[in-house]
Image: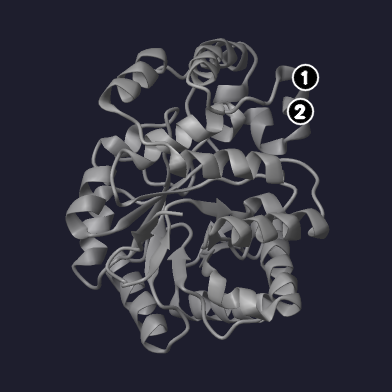
Amino acid sequence: MQQRMLGKSGIAVSALGYGAMSFSDFYGKTTEEASHAVLDAMIETGVTHLDTSNIYGNGRSETWIGSYLARNPAARDRFVIATKAGISKDAEGRRCFDNTPTHLEGELDKSLQKLGVDHVDLFYVHRRQEDLPIEEVTETLARLKAKGKTRAIGFSEIAPSSLRRAAAVAPIDAVQSEYSLQTRSPELGLVQTCAELGTALVAFSPVGRSLLTDAPIRPDRRGEVAFLKSNPRFMPGNHEANLEITDRFRALAADMGEPAAALAIAWLLAQGDHILPIPGTRSVQHFHEAVRGTEIALTAGDIARIESVLPVGWAHGDRYDTVQWVGPERYC
């Protein structure tokens, strides 16, 4: 497994990581046993980058990682563990964002307890609190790093301008954002700014929430996933159009003798040495298809063929609806 650096932290990670939101029921029902099987597959294939959050499955993702580590103590040294905090609820139970020092450290302490570790390798602010300057939040993250509770720090879904402000206070090791052949907005500043500042760009949903795989979610199944019921790219009309377009990508992958997911991962890795895709799946088979992407060396001609079937802007519908857009910073 090829290695890449996690920003300027000095931490090496596998070029491919794993997004453990799939240890919740976000994309469908799963079990602790199935989740542990994915962790076994990570160790077998040399995938070290393990990404989770305190809110995935209301803490279940972290708890299941913790139970795995408890059964396999040596596995702690095989994983580079990232988690996040900053999404909370107000007194009325409504979703809000809290980046205050007390909240972030308190939630990190809870995460450490669920994971059964004394520190994580990377700690992100999951969503920015608009009325709190990012400089102050960065100072909080730097203090947590100085205390030894995390080895590296980052932000999720921030704009390039916010990254520059944060990086003026302390090195930002990673920024997490949706990036794939389906969602290319990071190329309008975030990819470049991360490269300039020495920050890793951790790409979630790198296979387009299944649309860039050989087993995309079909219209008769979108009702099974709450997130997709209102997501514009999976709305009636848009969903069918996106499936028709990505059929061309699946055909190209088959012609090249590769799984579609592997080709999508290979394309992302070719966009820069600082790009770190973290696909999530409940299937060990699908996980291995993503791993295959790290073994494919695309030529300039290959990339041109891929982008000819999926040109910039091909997707029908926005990546989020109005409610889903609350929190991520829009910069283009």
List the residue tagged with mark 2: 223
Q: Is residue 143 above or below residue 25?
A: below
Residue 55: x percent and y percent?
A: 63, 61
Along the horizontal axis of the image, is 172 left or right of 328? left
Residue found at the far bottom of this picture: 147
User: Can you tell which of label 2 and label 1 is closer to the viewer?
Assistant: 1
Along the horizontal axis of the image, is 76 left or right of 217? left
Residue 286: x percent and y percent?
A: 65, 39
Residue 287: x percent and y percent?
A: 62, 44
> Would you call the spot at circle 2 few (<14 residues within 10 Å), some (14-19), or many (20 or more)?
few
> In the rendered structure, are the residues bearing label 2 and label 1 in contact, judged by CB atoms less than 8 Å apart?
yes
Tell me if residue 143 can be seen.
Answer: yes
Q: Is residue 234 above or below residue 268?
A: above
Disc number placed over residue 256 in the picture, else none: none
Q: CA distance from mark 2 to mark 1?
A: 7 Å
Mark count: 2
List the residue tagged with mark 1: 220
Front residue of 172 and 104: 172
Residue drawn where x is 26% and y is 49% of the image: 160
Residue 181 falls in which quadrant of the image? top left
Along the horizontal axis of the image, is 18 left or right of 164? right
Residue 189: x percent and y percent?
A: 23, 41
Local secondary structure at mark 1: helix
Front residue of 129 and 331: 331
Front residue of 312 and 224: 312
Front residue of 306 and 102: 306
**What's the residue type where badge 2 is placed?**
Gly
Local secondary structure at mark 2: helix
Tell me if residue 311 can be seen.
Answer: no
